[in-house]
C-alpha cells in the first residue's frame, strides 16, 4: 500500500536516501528520488568521484565512496553488479548508520541477501528492491519487487514512500520467490536472443540487410536481440551466473535447440511435430479459443530496421522460438503464471512465441520448412552452436569469458543501436498499450462470466 502524501512528506523532511553505484539504474533512482523531493546521497567508483560530481552534483549530493553514503543515509541501496555485491558490501557494510535500512538492486537476490546477513551490523534492517525493467523504460506501471527480509512495518512504509515516485506496481516476494520467478521469466528468453546475436555475428550477417529476414516476426527478433546487446553485459551475466535456477534452464534451452535441430536434419518430421505440439499444449493449452493475441504481422511490420520495402514474409524454421517453448515445456514453466513480475522484454518474448504457436497455420508452416527446406539450415546450425556456447560459459560461471563474448558481439552491432533503440522503444510502447488493453478485455470478460 502506497503511503499518503502527508506520510511521504514527513519522511522526506527527516530522512536521507543513499545510492551506492551510479550505473544506469542507480543513476535513474538517484535522479528520480531527488526530483521527487528526497535528500539523496550517491557515489560510484572512487576514481570517478570528480566526474560524477561535475555531471550530477547539482541534482543530488555526490560523495567520494560508499563509507560517506553509509554513515549518513537512512535507506541505502546497493546498485552494483551481482558478481561484485559481496565484495562491495564487505567494504562499506560496517559503516552503515545505526538503525538504518539496507537493500540492493541486483537481479539475483540470494547472493545479495547472503552478503547483507554476513557483513551488515545486526541493528540494520534489510528491505531489497528490484525494478523489473531497464533504465530506458518508463517506470510507470512496471513491476517493482519489494523484499521485506528483516524489517518492521514502519520501515517498509518508509521504503514504499521512497519508491512511490516511480509509479511502479509493487509486488511483494521473498528473495527465494524472486530468484525463481526471474529465472523462469528471463533465463531462457535471454539465452535465445543472446544466441541470435552471436549466431548472426559468427556468420557475419546483419539480418536487416538480408531480404531473407523479412516479416513482422523477424523484425521483433532483430529488435529484441539488438536491444539486449545495447545494454551492459552484467545485466544478463548476473542473472545467468549467480542464479542457480537459471543454470538448468539455460542448459535445457541449448539441449532443446540441439535436439530439435537433430530431428530437422534427420528428416524425422513426425517426431518433430509430435514434440512441438506436446510443448504447445503444455504452455498454451490453457488459453481460451477466443484468446486475443498480443502481436500480429501487420503490427510488427511497422518496426523494421531494413531498407527493403515491406514484402512477402520469408518462412523459416523459427528454431529459436520453437526451442523456447520446448524448454518451458520440459521445465514445467507456464509463463503466464508470472506475468505480474514480467519485464517489458519478457512480455514481448511471450507475445512473439504466442504469435508463432497460436496463429492458425503459422506453426505448421515453420515445421514444414524446418524439415523440407534447407535455406536456413546453416543459420540454424550457427544458432545451435551459439546456444551451446552460452550454456557452457554459464556452466563454468566465467564472468570474464561472458563479458568478452558479449562485448565482441556488442561491438559488431554497435552502429545500429541508436536507430534500433528508437524503433524498439516505439515497438515496446505500442505492445505495452496492447497488453493493457488485453488485460482490460480479459477482466471485463471475467466480470461478465461471474454475473
Image (cartoon, rainbow, N blue to C red):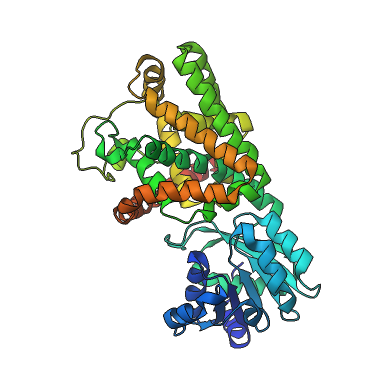
On screen, residue 368 above or below 89: above
Depth check, front residue: 295 or 243 = 243
Q: Position of residue 51 (x, y in %)?
A: 45, 78
- Residue reaching furthest left? 309
Q: Position of residue 135 (x, y in %)?
A: 46, 62
Is residue 291 visible to us here? no
Q: Position of residue 257 (x, y in %)?
A: 51, 28
Is residue 25 visible to us here? yes
In which quadrant is the N terminus drawn?
bottom right
Depth check, front residue: 64 or 425 = 64
At a point 38% along the width and 17% down the height, the residue shown is 368
At a point 25% along the width and 39% down the height, the residue shown is 209
Depth check, front residue: 336 or 33 = 33
Report whether 373 appears left or right of 272.
left
At a point 64% along the width and 37% down the height, the residue shown is 248
Q: Which quadrant of the structure image shows residue 201?
A: top left
Depth check, front residue: 326 or 196 = 196
Q: Position of residue 97 (x, y in %)?
A: 72, 81
- Residue reaching furthest right? 122
At a point 71% along the width and 74% down the height, the residue shown is 154
Report whether 86 appears left or right of 62.
right
Please tell me how many numbered marks the rendered image carries. Answer: 0
Amino acid at each position: 500500500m502506497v503511503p499518503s502524501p502527508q506520510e511521504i512528506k514527513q519522511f522526506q523532511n527527516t530522512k536521507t536516501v543513499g545510492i551506492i553505484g551510479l550505473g544506469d539504474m542507480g543513476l535513474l533512482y538517484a535522479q528520480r528520488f531527488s526530483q521527487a523531493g528526497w535528500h539523496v546521497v550517491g557515489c560510484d567508483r572512487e576514481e570517478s568521484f570528480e566526474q560524477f560530481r561535475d555531471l550530477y552534483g547539482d541534482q543530488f549530493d555526490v560523495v567520494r565512496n560508499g563509507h560517506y553514503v553509509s554513515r549518513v543515509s537512512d535507506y541505502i541501496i546497493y546498485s552494483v553488479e551481482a558478481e561484485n555485491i559481496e565484495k562491495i558490501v564487505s567494504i562499506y557494510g560496517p559503516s552503515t548508520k545505526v538503525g538504518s535500512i539496507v537493500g540492493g538492486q541486483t537481479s539475483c537476490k540470494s547472493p545479495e541477501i547472503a552478503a547483507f546477513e554476513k557483513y551488515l551490523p545486526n541493528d540494520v534492517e534489510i528491505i531489497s528492491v528490484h525494478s523489473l525493467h531497464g533504465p530506458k523504460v518508463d517506470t510507470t506501471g512496471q513491476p517493482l519487487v519489494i523484499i521485506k527480509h528483516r524489517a518492521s512495518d514502519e520501515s517498509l512504509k518508509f521504503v514504499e514512500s521512497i519508491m512511490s515516485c516511480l509509479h511502479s506496481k509493487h509486488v511483494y516476494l521473498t528473495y527465494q520467490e524472486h530468484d525463481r520467478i526471474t529465472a523462469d521469466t528471463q533465463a531462457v528468453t535471454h539465452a535465445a536472443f543472446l544466441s541470435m546475436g552471436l549466431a548472426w555475428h559468427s556468420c557475419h550477417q546483419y539480418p536487416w540487410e538480408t531480404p531473407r529476414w523479412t516479416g513482422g516476426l523477424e523484425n521483433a527478433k532483430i529488435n529484441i536481440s539488438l536491444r539486449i546487446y545495447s545494454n551492459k553485459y552484467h545485466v544478463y551475466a548476473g542473472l545467468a551466473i549467480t542464479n542457480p535456477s537459471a543454470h538448468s534452464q539455460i542448459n535445457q534451452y541449448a539441449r532443446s535447440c540441439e535436439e530439435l535441430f537433430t530431428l530437422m536434419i534427420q528428416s524425422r518430421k513426425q517426431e518433430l511435430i509430435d514434440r512441438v505440439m506436446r510443448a504447445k499444449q503444455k504452455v498454451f493449452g490453457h488459453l481460451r479459443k477466443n484468446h486475443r493475441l498480443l502481436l500480429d504481422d501487420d503490427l510488427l511490420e511497422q518496426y523494421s530496421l531494413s531498407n527493403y520495402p515491406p514484402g512477402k514474409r520469408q518462412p523459416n524454421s523459427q528454431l529459436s522460438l520453437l526451442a523456447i517453448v520446448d524448454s518451458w515445456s520440459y521445465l514445467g514453466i507456464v509463463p503466464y503464471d508470472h506475468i505480474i513480475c514480467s519485464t517489458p522484454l519478457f512480455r514481448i518474448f511471450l507475445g512473439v512465441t504466442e504469435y508463432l504457436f497460436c496463429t492458425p497455420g503459422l506453426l505448421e508452416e515453420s515445421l514444414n520448412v524446418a524439415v523440407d527446406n534447407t535455406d536456413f539450415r546453416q543459420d540454424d546450425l550457427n544458432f545451435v552452436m551459439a546456444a551451446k556456447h552460452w550454456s557452457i560459459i554459464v556452466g563454468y560461471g566465467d564472468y570474464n569469458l561472458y563479458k568478452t563474448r558479449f562485448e565482441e558481439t556488442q561491438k559488431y552491432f554497435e552502429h545500429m543501436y541508436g536507430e534500433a533503440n528508437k524503433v524498439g522503444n516505439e515497438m515496446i510502447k505500442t505492445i505495452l498499450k496492447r497488453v493493457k488493453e488485453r488485460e482490460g478485455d480479459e477482466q471485463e470478460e471475467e466480470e461478465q462470466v461471474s454475473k
